């Protein structure tokens, strides 16, 4: 808690490693509550303290840099996220965490609209997992799921579905964690939409969305899959359903506050491109 942090600062001084660890605990607590701005503030402070106290090559420094990068990315500070991931990458070279950082860099490149770079990082992440864990490990399946979605984005849908199929084969003997299974389903739905197969995409995306709601996924993750569903429904002429889902997307992103503003940009661009008119919600009776 903040009281514990204040007590720690009084007892040990504001730059003691124990205080840095307290900041890291608070960062993770705010992440769980969905307040990424406060999480980033504490993660940044933890990184500063522990880098000075433990040295820039300490493994704890790399772990906190990854946390900081992920929360900076969540709130749209993409340059700051890149700096954090690039701080972590050389510190984890040759370890299992290298694949995690490479996957984070892939997701960041995707958010920047650079799908070619995203694919390079995704492939490197999957290759690192294979080198460390063999070809049939759950961690390799996760790499294939990330790579498959990126392949679909660059129009290589056959390669994308091959990656997803291989991930599902691995999952038959080594079950994937439930959230990862849901991501796989959602990515398969996206790939069908990217390939123009909207009739196939809709039920898959609906399944992924329902499963996300069941496990109480974060609003930003719900909104991402829901917007894919919006676009697929719209392409099929199911306009009323698409508009209803679009309103839900806005609600989910708005619940995050101003830090989600950058995530509205592709939605606004799609609305303008498609000439979508969103009717106002009916006023309550009375």
Image (cartoon, grey):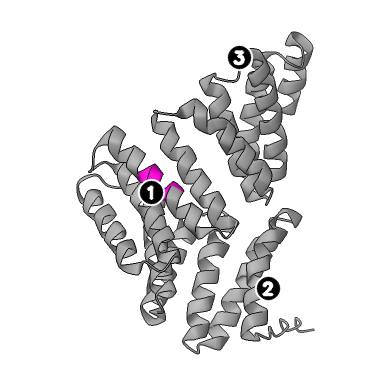
Number of numbered discs overlaid on the protein picture: 3
Q: Is residue 35 visible?
A: no
Q: Is residue 39 visible?
A: yes
Tag shown at residue 54: 3
Q: Residues within 10 Å of mark 3 (few under 14, many from 20)?
A: some
Are circles 2 and 1 on residues that touch, CB within 8 Å? no
Could you tell which of marks 2 and 1 lies nearer the N-terminus? 1
Point 63% across, 42% down: residue: 81
Residue bearing mark 1: 123
Q: Position of residue 279 (x, y in %)?
A: 70, 85
**Residue nearest the viewer, comparing 260 with 89:** 89
Q: Position of residue 60 (x, y in %)?
A: 54, 22
Q: Position of residue 244 (x, y in %)?
A: 59, 79
Residue bearing mark 2: 268
Report whether 127 appears left or right of 135.
Answer: right
Q: Residues within 10 Å of mark 1 (few under 14, many from 20)?
A: many
**Residue nearest the viewer, comparing 143 with 42:** 143
Q: CA distance from mark 2 to mark 1?
A: 31 Å
Give the foreground label among 2 and 1: 1
């Amino acid at each position: 808690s903040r009281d514990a942090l204040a007590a720690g600062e009084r007892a040990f001084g504001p730059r003691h490693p124990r205080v840095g660890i307290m900041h890291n605990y608070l960062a993770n607590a705010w992440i769980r509550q969905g307040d990424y701005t406060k999480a980033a503030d504490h993660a940044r402070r933890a990184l500063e303290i522990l880098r000075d106290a433990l040295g820039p090559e300490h493994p704890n420094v790399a772990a906190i840099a990854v946390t900081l990068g992920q929360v900076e990315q969540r709130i749209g500070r993409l340059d700051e996220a890149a700096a954090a991931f690039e701080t972590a990458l050389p510190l984890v070279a040759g370890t299992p965490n290298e694949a995690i950082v490479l996957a984070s860099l892939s997701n960041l490149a995707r958010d920047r609209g650079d799908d070619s770079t995203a694919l390079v990082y995704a492939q490197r992440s999957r290759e690192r997992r294979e080198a460390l864990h063999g070809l049939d490990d759950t961690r390799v399946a996760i790499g294939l799921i990330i790579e498959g979605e990126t392949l679909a984005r660059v129009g290589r849908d056959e390669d994308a579905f091959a990656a997803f199929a291989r991930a599902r084969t691995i999952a038959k003997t080594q079950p994937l964690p439930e959230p990862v299974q849901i991501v796989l389903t959602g990515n398969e739905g996206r790939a069908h939409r990217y390939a123009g197969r909207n009739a196939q995409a809709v039920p898959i995306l609906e399944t992924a969305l329902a499963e996300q709601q069941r496990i109480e996924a974060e609003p930003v993750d719900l909104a991402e899959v829901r917007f894919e569903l919006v676009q697929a429904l719209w392409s099929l002429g199911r306009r009323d359903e698409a508009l209803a889902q679009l309103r839900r997307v806005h609600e989910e992103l708005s619940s995050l506050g101003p830090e989600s503003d950058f995530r509205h940009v592709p939605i606004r661009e799609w609305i303008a491109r498609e000439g979508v008119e969103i009717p106002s919600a009916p006023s309550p009776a009375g």
